Every structure is written in C-alpha cells, then in structure tokens.
Image: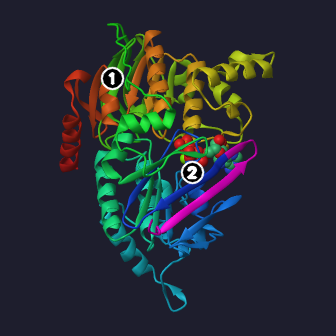
Amino acid sequence: MTTPLWELVNICKAFPGVRANDGISIRLNAGEIHALLGENGCGKSTLIKILSGVHQPDNGEIRLNGVPLTLGSPIDARTKGVATVFQEFSLAPTLSVAENIFLGRYPRRGPFVDWARMQAEAERILASLEIRIDPRRLVGSLSVAEQQLVEIAKAISVEATLLILDEPTTALGAHEILVLHNLLRRMKSRGVAVLYISHRLDEVVELVDTATILKDGRVASTAEATRLDIPSIVTAMIGTSVDEHYPKEQNATNEVLIEVEGLWSAAGARGASFSVQRGEVFGLGGVIGSGRTEIARAVFGADKITGGRVRVAGRKLRLRSPRDAIAAGIALVPENRKFDGLFFNFNGGPNITSAAIGSIRRLFLLNKSEEARITTNYIRDLEISPAAATKFVNLLSGGNQQKIVIARWLFAQSQVLILDEPTQGIDIGAKIAVYRLINQLTARGCAVILISSDHAELIAMSDRIGIVRGGAVVETRPASQITHAHLVQASASAATAA
Ligand SMILES: Nc1ncnc2c1ncn2[C@@H]1O[C@H](COP(=O)(O)OP(=O)(O)OP(=O)(O)O)[C@@H](O)[C@H]1O
Ligand SMILES: [Mg+2]
C-alpha cells in the first residue's frame, strides 16, 4: 500500500468512565473526501480533537507522509497543516467577522496590524464561499447559519493539507450546502485531504469518496470496506437495518388548536398567519433568513411582538415572555441549543425538569428522588446516554443534548410543540426516535410546528407545509403535494426577491 498523506494509527483516548477512542486507525489520502460516520457519542469529535491538537491521545500515533509527529496544541496543528471546523463554534462574539477569520495571525505592515488588508482578504475568502456578510460585523450579531459560514471561512483561510469539518452543515440550508460541497471539491482537486463528519447521510453519499464508520470508539467498517449507500452505512452504524426512515402517522383532527394571525415581531416576523390542528404536524419550509425561526420565537413569546394575535384553543394569549407561552402550553425546542436550550453546568435531571419545576417541588423543596426517577424514564424512552443522569450536559455528545431538550418539553406536558431543526446533528437511530416522539405527541392531540432544512424529513413528517418568505407564510399546501424541487424553487424565488 502507498503511504497516505495523513495516517492515524491505533489512537486511544479515555475520559472518566468512557473509552471515547479505543484503537482507531484511519488512512487519509491526498485529494480524497473521507467521511467519518457513527452514532452520537461514538467518538468522532474526540478523534478530530486529537487531530487538531485539542486533546493528546493516551496511545497511538499520527503520521504525516509516513513520519510520526505530535500535534501539541491547536496552533501547533494548524501550523502543521490541519484546519478544523469544530462542531462547537470557536468564534469570539465581540470581535468582527474579519478579526475572527484572522484571529492570532492578523496581517501586519511593519509593527502595525494591516486592517485594510485584513478587510480585503476577509472579503475575498467570504466571496469564495458566496457568503454575503460584511466582514466588519460583530460575530455576536450574526445568525447561527451565518456564524457557521464564518467558522468555515476561518478554517479555509489557512493553507492546509488536511481539512476537517465536524458537522459543518447542521445549520445550513440547501443552497449553502451546495456551495460548501463545491468548495470542498475544489480543495480536493488541489490535493487536500478532507475529513467530513455529518449525520445527513444523503449529503454524505453525494459528496464523499470513502468512509470510515465508528461504533463505541472503534472502527466498525474501514474506508475500504464501506459501501457508499445509505442502507449499508446505516447497517454498519447501528448494527441492524432500518426499513422505515420516516414512520409518519396520520393523527390530524379537524379541531384547530393554535391560530396565528398577522403576527409581527421586532425580530422579523412580518405578518405571519397559519393555524395548526390538534394532532397535526405543520411544517415550515423556507431558506435560511426566510424568517422561520423568527416566527417560532414570536409564537413562543421570546421576541417582542409588535402586531397580530396568537390563540390557543380559542383563547387569545398575551405573550410578553416565554413564561406566558409555557403557561399556555406552548414549547419551543430551539435551533440553537447551545445558547438557548441547555444549562450546561448541570446534569440531565435539572435540564429535563426545569420547565415544569413546579410539578416536582414539594413544600418549596426540590424532590430529588422524583427528579431522578423522571430522568431515568426519559433516558430509557428516548434512548439517551445513561451518562446524562450524572454528567454535566456539556460533556455529552451533541445528539444526547438534543434529546434532553425534547425530554424537557415532553415533561412540561406542552400542547403545542415548536420543533426548530429537531434532528440537527443527531444520528439516524435518534432521528427515528424523534419521529416516533412526534407521533406520540400528535396521537395525544398535540399540535406540532416543525421547522427543518432537511427537505426529505420535512415533507415526510408534516401533514401540511407552509412556505415562509420574508417573515410570512406565503403558501400552504398538503405535504403530499410538495416536492424537493418545490422547496428549492421557493428558495430560488426568495433569493431573487432579496
Ligand atoms: N471532555 C470530555 N470529558 C468527558 N467525557 C467526554 C468529553 N468529551 C467527550 N466525552 C465523551 O466521549 C464520548 C465520545 O464523544 P464524542 O463527542 O467524541 O462523540 P461524537 O461521535 O462526536 O458524537 P456526536 O455525533 O453526538 O457529536 C461520549 O461518551 C462523550 O460523553
Ligand atoms: Mg461530535
């Protein structure tokens, strides 16, 4: 066998109570896009943190052109040619986009920072990604999708021989994903080795040349052995085959539960109207920036409402804050669980019970054993990692964090659930678990508002779909009459309208 460009040999890394990487060997060739796949918590991010100098392996070797080397720190790894887009963003919110891209290596003229050049360079990099963001803007003012694009821009701004992307598309829409894939193909033709992590398997089989599948910290299928079709990948990942990816049940009744009428918010809902029946899943389709999240946040009382009405079961609500929405039985599983969704310095228990804390309080004291019992039940029902009972949630894998947010709203007995990208970043098994949860909710008579950039999922799991543009629902149809092409078309007309 020829020597690969980069090679990992028998990498081991343990954390207290878990062998995150247990003897992993992978060969990464120049000019190849290599997928790293596996269920939540199987050790993908740990491995790429080792390759990026964030963690040191307990055992094993990293080789570049056959020569062993150490990657002592993130800066060390970067100078040795590894560029990484991390799953958790590493941007500084109080700095500008340009400053973030060049953090730690501002261009200089003599002893001074060359701001003009930094600006121009940042513009060039953003343009190559077709990103229309002013490099002078503060990162903290950007949407999640925009931040994700800046994170990618930052990684590709350094000359690299290995480009690693850990779920780079979770917050991106169809168009942004296309642009990113084209960029990766260009990197590939320049001889860069690309290591790509994603739970969107349709996207993976479309893009990559080869794949390694991990299971419980070990290699379950090597690059040579992995067949690049979804059923084979799923079987290698979870050990069994899946015949029903979208187990949709028809539970819609004709009783309207929530009515949104001409809703305006300071943040960007612009006259949104729609209603959702008990037992119905109402999908919101549209591009990034179309206003889907803003509509969701307004209905949840999270952004200031400037006009319009929301009624639940015929009763008009006064939505001054999420507290009012929660009291009316409305729940929001936010898109950005990192900032809005979880209390990171607590374990799973308080995270699950927080929205309905009153129900487990006894004479002002928190009933800890009750909390533990509830947590154990949700861990079992939603197949959450058992570690959630004891570990701080920031140490859990991304998918397990998502399940905990959903568990919270289930526990709070919500009637109207707004799920904003609920399967973002979770593995195929967990996705199907979320779909089943949606069925359970609708069977109980809940109304579900589903926002998803995964078109196949949105069409399969919704009863009706409203297409959102400019903060309003511009068209509503039964999901069965909506196609992928239709949703892409909606994006295209939005782009020309903008
Ligand atoms: N800093 C840490 N301290 C303790 N445990 C950790 C730490 N980082 C990761 N783990 C644990 O190591 C295991 C592997 O986690 P890792 O983040 O690598 O999974 P992953 O494959 O990236 O999952 P996902 O698809 O959900 O992102 C998990 O059990 C996780 O809880
Ligand atoms: Mg990960």
- Extent of the magenta region: 1-19
Q: Residue 346, how many percent across, how many down? A: 71, 37
> Residue 337's quadrant in the figure?
top right
- On the question of residue 131 being in view, the answer is no
Name the residue: 40% across, 81% down. Answer: 117
Q: Residue 491, how many percent across, how many down? A: 23, 43
Q: Residue furthest front?
A: 1
Label placed on residue 86: none
Q: Secondary structure at mark 2?
A: helix
Mark 2: is the Cβ under 8 angstroms from ligand 2? yes
Q: Residue 51, how many percent across, how many down? A: 57, 62
Name the residue: 65% across, 49% down. Answer: 22
280 or 290: which is nearer to us? 280
Label placed on residue 462: 1
- The image shows residue 62, relative to residue 176, as above or below, that is below
480 or 261: which is nearer to us? 480
Residue tagged by mark 2? 45
Q: Quadrant of the N terminus?
A: bottom left
27 or 327: which is nearer to us? 27
Looking at the rendered structure, the kind of residue marked 1 is Ser
66 within the magenta span: no
Q: Mark 1 touching mark 2, by CB under 8 A?
A: no
Query: In terms of image quarters, where does ligand 1 lie?
Result: top right
13 within the magenta span: yes
Q: Residue furthest bottom?
A: 110
For residue 123, side relative to residue 333 (left or right): left
